[in-house]
Each structure stands twice: as C-alpha cells, then as structure tokens.
C-alpha cells in the first residue's frame, strides 16, 4: 500500500495491532512491543481509523530505518505523511 510499499517495512507478522480505550489519543506506536494501537474511544469513523493507522505506520517506518526521532512529527515524518495525504485526499495540515 502506497507509500509504504516503497519504504523498508517489517514483515506483517512482526507487527501487532491492538485496540485500546484511551479517549485522549487516536493511536500510538509502541516500539518495544512493535505494536500499533488504535483507540476505539477516539476513533469513531473508518476514515479516522485509516488516518490513525497511516500516521502510526509512519512512526513505525521511521523506527525501522533507525531514526532516533521516529516518535516526532518533524520534517522526516511530514515528508511521508504528505505523500499519503495527497494520495488519499486527507487534510495535509492534519497530524
Ligand atoms: Zn504521531
């Protein structure tokens, strides 16, 4: 799935997914567990789930390539995010 098909990503069986209940975050990437978490109390629509998944996949991609600031939303994060925002017609200013 673009743009992640052009990035070094782990095999799918190496990444876990978990539904959490935290209403204060849409999701997060836990590098220790290699787990993407999506909050069912913050994401009520498919679009929100999809945007959150893509967002966390960027953090995962940055982590896998060894970026120390993989958890931040700096220029490296935004470079990938801007690609999927354009592809999937998401608000480019939303994080
Ligand atoms: Zn983030």
Image (spheres, rainbow, N blue to C red):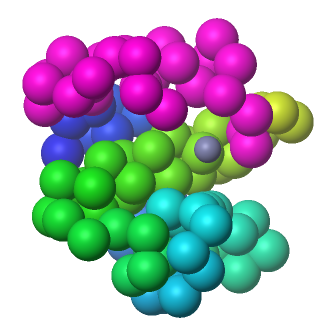
Q: In which quadrant of the rendered view does residue 40 lie?
A: bottom left
Residue 89 as seen in the image, left or right of residue 9: left
* Tag count: 0
Ligand 1 resides in the quarter of the picture at top right
Residue 61 as seen in the image, left or right of residue 93: right
Q: Position of residue 93 (x, y in %)?
A: 41, 17
Q: Is residue 77 above or below residue 17?
A: above
Foreground of the two, 92 or 23: 23
Foreground of the two, 34 or 24: 24
The residue that appears at 49% across and 14% down in the rendered structure is 79
Q: Position of residue 63 (x, y in %)?
A: 69, 46
Q: Position of residue 30 (x, y in %)?
A: 70, 69
Magenta stretch: includes residue 83: yes
The residue that appears at 63% across and 38% down in the rendered structure is 62
Q: Is residue 47 above or below residue 80?
A: below
Q: In which quadrant of the rendered view does residue 84 lie?
A: top left
Foreground of the two, 8 or 63: 63
The residue that appears at 35% across and 68% down in the rendered structure is 43
Residue 9 as seen in the image, left or right of residue 63: left
Q: Give the farthest residue toward the right.
A: 68
Is residue 2 something one can see in this rendering? yes
Magenta stretch: includes residue 25: no
Residue 45 as seen in the image, left or right of residue 84: left
Q: Is residue 9 above or below residue 36?
A: above
The residue that appears at 18% across and 45% down in the rendered structure is 1
Q: Is residue 28 above or below residue 89?
A: below
Foreground of the two, 34 or 55: 55
The magenta segment is: 70-95
Q: Position of residue 13 (x, y in %)?
A: 41, 81
Is residue 65 something one can see in this rendering? no
């Amino acid at each position: 799935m673009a743009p992640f098909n052009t990035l070094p990503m782990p095999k799918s069986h190496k990444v876990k997914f978990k539904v959490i209940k935290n209403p204060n975050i849409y999701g997060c990437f836990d590098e220790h567990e290699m787990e993407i978490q999506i909050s069912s109390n913050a994401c009520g629509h498919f679009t929100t789930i999809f945007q959150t998944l893509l967002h966390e996949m960027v953090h995962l991609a940055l982590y896998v390539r060894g970026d120390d600031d993989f958890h931040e939303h700096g220029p490296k994060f935004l470079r990938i995010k801007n690609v999927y925002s354009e592809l999937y017609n998401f608000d480019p200013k939303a994080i």
